[in-house]
């Protein structure tokens, strides 16, 4: 967590001094949009598997999975962002993130596309618009080959979980 | 020498010694004349000093040194034990604890010199030293001029150094040295039983001795000693200008050295070896060693018991009758506490072992699952099944042994309580006594580490709120000294710890009024609540009935913390109380945390596990037996009315069973309360490994964890206690 916050938040200041810092992102697809997750926060990517429901949880917390003997909670990032519910296809994956405070957590994504390297110059930080809304999971946008990639602010995810 | 690698051992030992000192000084307070206790105290203080010195903690060493001086005077009868002195000593122990904490946190003892304490100690020394002097000298008069307070008569041991074969070169070296006016001593060093780093201790002894003397022979030889190839003692022959007493002292300053004996060595043709006046006791003359030994042995048929007095700056006892001074104390000192033969293992290593066992059990479960599916297919399944059964028994045994390794007696936690009660007694100005039983009851290490605070809270509660003031007690015809009991015992798969007092008990009406006043409950609710329910309100956050907030308790942060702590350990806490007669707080904790026996059930199409510990019976109930009481479903089971909980509703799933089918009901019990959990289907009993759900999923009260089944699927564990 620390890492990504640092790399994201310090970008404006660091632009002048170290313009060549490169961060790798895993690009995932949710519906028609592309999102990027800092590769340093990713533990594993696994195929969709049976998720055991946990009662009395918010809808976006789908339940838990068994990943090599460890019980890991799984979150629907779509429901979390008020998008239509997940459609499970062959391309659906669970991305397991390692977060410093809360341990590991899995995200259901429609597809994992590729790894891109983004220069800090290609990343544009978004203004922190709505503190209360769920929209501010995204705190920056990266440009890669003419396409836009929304970058997750993982600290926001962990705070609300 | 780099001592940092011994830091952990140092800390462990220091804590042990401090605890020991705490206990013993308490004993001393109630029985000031007990020489056994005094000796034990002295020994512990001395070891502490030595250890602190070795590790280079000067302030700690100074303080312990001054404490040791006081103990030494007490032991010699020069000072009488007085209450003020005990207070000062306890303050010293607190200061030492502070040093230890500092060392643990920062590897440095801190900068507090504790001068006021040292001053007080010295005052005790000065103040007490005079009057009893006469007595002491009388006692000492019996033999020789034993005036030096620190003189501990040291028993004779076998003069092992006489048995060392010397070759001609060595003899010539010895002769040479003698001609130069140096003395030749034989030194025998005995390491404490259960010492962990014998070689390291021996090394420190070698080093200490070498500062004063030249080691010419070592038996076993130095290399073997370094490789720990010796039993419990080793013998040195040294050349030195210093008196033998100094060398012995130096060696004894190394901790975990039980005894050091030494004397002038005599070569066969050197019977007339002059015996120097090494002893500060200044005995007018000492007999030549060899004859002395012969002389002594008949008079002391058992020289070995004397060995236990490792404390004192020992002297080779030249005066055979010197032991007469404290014959009683000496004999008692022999019965040292039995030291557990233990290996210190990092808890993390045990955790990883435990995880492996867990994995093994999961693997076993999946084998069992696989075998039951394929059973029909092959006839040669018999062998397969046998092997699985074998594996099953092995994993169960393995699990049990690993659990046992993790078990420690709760003694390590509760032994600090007598001291605490004593302090509370003074602070609150109430007379009270703590009685403890079952200190040997064992619990998982992680539980034992956590249980201290809640217990302390309950004890403080009893002392502060529970016990009445002396006047009230007298009015009620109770003994002036209040009693608090701490009882621990095992009960099936649980360990029960009870804190009892014969004090006032809980004033239910006061709690009721307080609750209404605070708006916790409405007056209407209050009328309908049973006493038990009212008492349960005490466990709510920030609920204190104490009229006055004291230092000890009454800030309302106590009982809710106790409860949440105990519940985080999967335990429960209950209270029974009778106004005017006292209260009983009962803590019930599971023996093991990681692996439990559970009943697997199906609700809807989901599998759940219920801990067998809370299950009473399984019942098959026809729907017609269900009655409604206050619009809630209950059943009348053999005369007991039990509320029903439909799990499918609690868990938000559709039941698969139709309305008119018989219900499968799991009867669970929590304390006196029972409930019937309605499930859809039974799978059976299984050993399950508890996994946490992670921090994301903690809101759910009645799910206490998850487990991985044989097929890799996850089943959630229902906490029946939270459902009732």
Image (tube, coloured by chain):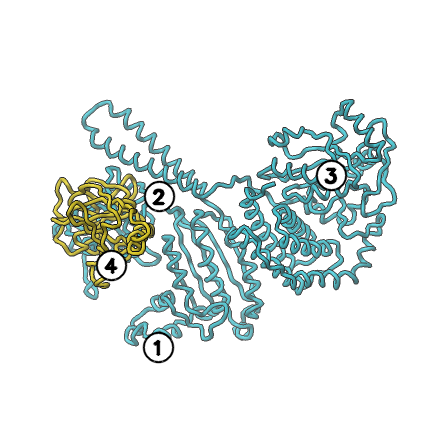
Chain colours: A yellow, B cyan
CA separation, marks 1 and 4? 32 Å
Q: At 66% across and 65% down in the image, what residue appears? A: B84
Quickly name the residue at label 2. B595
CA separation, marks 4 and 3? 75 Å
Quickly name the residue at label 3. B261
* Mark toward the start of the polypeptide (1 vs 3): 3
CA separation, marks 1 and 3? 73 Å
Q: Are marks 2 and 4 on the same chain?
A: yes
CA separation, marks 2 and 1? 45 Å
Closest to the camera, between mark 1 and mark 3, is 3
A139 left or right of B573 in image: left
Quickly name the residue at label 4. B643
Closest to the camera, between mark 3 and mark 2, is 3
Helix, strand or loop at mark 3: strand
CA separation, marks 3 and 2? 52 Å
Q: At 14% across and 49% down in the image, what residue appears? A: A33
Helix, strand or loop at mark 4: strand
Residue B517, which numbered label?
A: 1
Q: Are marks 4 and 3 on the same chain?
A: yes
Marked residue chain, label 2: B
């Amino acid at each position: 967590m620390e890492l990504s916050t640092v790399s994201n938040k310090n970008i404006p200041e660091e632009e002048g001094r170290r313009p060549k810092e490169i961060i790798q992102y895993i690009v995932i697809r949710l519906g028609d949009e592309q999102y990027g997750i800092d590769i340093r926060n990713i533990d594993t990517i696994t195929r969709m598997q049976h998720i055991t429901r946990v009662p009395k949880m918010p809808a976006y917390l789908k339940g838990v999975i068994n990943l090599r003997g460890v019980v890991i909670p799984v979150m629907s990032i779509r429901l979390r962002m008020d998008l239509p519910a997940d459609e499970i296809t062959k391309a659906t994956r669970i991305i397991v993130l390692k977060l410093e405070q809360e341990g590991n957590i899995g995200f259901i994504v429609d597809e994992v596309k590729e790894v891109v390297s983004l220069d800090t110059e290609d990343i544009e930080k978004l203004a922190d618009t709505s503190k209360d809304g769920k929209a501010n999971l995204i705190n920056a946008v990266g440009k890669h080959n003419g396409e836009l990639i929304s970058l997750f602010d993982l600290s926001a995810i962990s705070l609300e979980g | 020498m780099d001592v940092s690698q011994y830091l952990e051992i140092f800390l462990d030992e220091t804590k042990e010694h401090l605890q020991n000192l705490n206990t013993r000084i308490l004993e001393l307070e109630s029985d000031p004349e007990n020489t056994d206790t005094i000796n034990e105290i002295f020994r512990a203080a001395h070891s502490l000093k030595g250890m602190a010195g070795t590790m280079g903690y000067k302030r700690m060493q100074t303080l312990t040194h001054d404490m040791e001086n006081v103990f030494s005077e007490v032991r010699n009868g020069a000072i009488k034990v007085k209450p003020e002195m005990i207070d000062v000593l306890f303050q010293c122990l607190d200061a030492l604890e502070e040093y230890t904490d500092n060392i643990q946190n920062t590897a440095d003892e801190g900068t507090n010199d504790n001068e006021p304490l040292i001053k007080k100690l010295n005052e005790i020394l000065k103040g007490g030293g005079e009057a009893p002097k006469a007595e002491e000298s009388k006692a000492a008069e019996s033999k020789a001029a034993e005036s030096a307070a620190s003189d501990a008569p040291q028993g004779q041991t076998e003069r092992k150094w006489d048995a060392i074969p010397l070759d001609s070169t060595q003899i010539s070296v010895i002769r040479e040295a003698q001609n130069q006016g140096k003395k030749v001593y034989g030194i025998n060093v005995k390491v404490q039983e259960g010492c962990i780093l014998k070689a390291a201790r021996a090394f420190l002894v070698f080093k200490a001795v070498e500062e004063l003397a030249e080691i010419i022979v070592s038996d076993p030889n130095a290399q073997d000693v370094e490789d720990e190839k010796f039993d419990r003692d080793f013998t040195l022959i040294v050349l030195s200008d210093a008196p033998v007493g100094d060398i012995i002292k130096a060696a004894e300053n190394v901790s975990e050295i039980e005894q050091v004996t030494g004397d002038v060595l005599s070569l066969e043709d050197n019977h007339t070896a002059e015996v120097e006046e090494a002893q500060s006791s200044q005995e007018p003359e000492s007999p030549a060693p060899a004859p002395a030994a012969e002389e002594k042995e008949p008079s002391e048929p058992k020289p070995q018991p004397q060995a236990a007095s490792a404390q004192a700056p020992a002297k080779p006892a030249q005066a055979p009758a010197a032991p007469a001074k404290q014959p009683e104390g000496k004999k008692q000192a022999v019965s040292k506490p039995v030291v557990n033969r233990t290996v210190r293992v990092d808890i993390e290593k045990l955790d990883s072992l435990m995880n492996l066992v867990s994995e093994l059990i999961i693997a076993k479960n999946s084998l069992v699952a696989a075998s039951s599916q394929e059973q029909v297919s092959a006839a040669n399944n018999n062998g397969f099944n046998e092997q699985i059964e074998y594996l099953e028994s092995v994993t169960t045994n393995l699990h049990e042994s690993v659990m046992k390794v993790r078990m420690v007696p709760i003694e390590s936690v509760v032994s600090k309580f007598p001291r605490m009660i004593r302090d509370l007694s003074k602070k609150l100005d109430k007379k009270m006594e703590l009685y403890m039983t079952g200190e040997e009851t064992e619990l998982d290490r992680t539980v034992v580490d956590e249980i201290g605070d809640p217990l302390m809270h309950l004890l403080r509660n009893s002392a502060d709120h529970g016990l009445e003031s002396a006047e009230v007690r007298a009015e009620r015809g109770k003994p002036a000294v209040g009693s608090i009991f701490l009882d621990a015992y095992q009960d099936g798969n649980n360990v029960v710890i009870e804190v009892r007092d014969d004090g006032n008990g809980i004033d239910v009406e006061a709690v009721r009024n307080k609750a209404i006043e605070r708006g916790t409950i409405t007056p209407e609710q209050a009328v309908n609540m049973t006493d038990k329910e009212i008492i349960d309100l005490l466990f709510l956050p920030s609920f204190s009935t104490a009229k006055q907030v004291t230092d000890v308790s009454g800030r309302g942060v106590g009982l809710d913390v106790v409860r949440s702590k105990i519940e985080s350990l999967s335990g429960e806490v209950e209270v029974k109380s009778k106004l005017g007669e006292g209260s009983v707080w009962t803590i019930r904790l599971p023996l093991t945390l990681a692996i439990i026996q559970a009943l697997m059930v199906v609700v809807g199409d989901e599998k759940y596990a219920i801990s067998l510990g809370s299950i009473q019976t399984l019942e098959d109930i026809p729907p017609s037996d269900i009655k409604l009481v206050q619009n809630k479903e209950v059943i009348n089971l053999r005369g007991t009315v039990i509320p029903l909980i439909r799990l499918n509703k609690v868990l938000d799933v559709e039941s698969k069973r139709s309305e008119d089918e018989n219900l499968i009901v799991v009867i669970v019990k929590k304390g006196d309360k029972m409930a019937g959990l309605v499930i859809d289907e039974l799978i059976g009993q299984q050993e399950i490994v508890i996994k946490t759900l992670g921090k994301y999923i903690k809101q759910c009260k009645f799910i206490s964890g998850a487990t991985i089944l044989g097929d890799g699927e996850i089943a959630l564990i229902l906490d029946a206690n939270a459902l009732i």
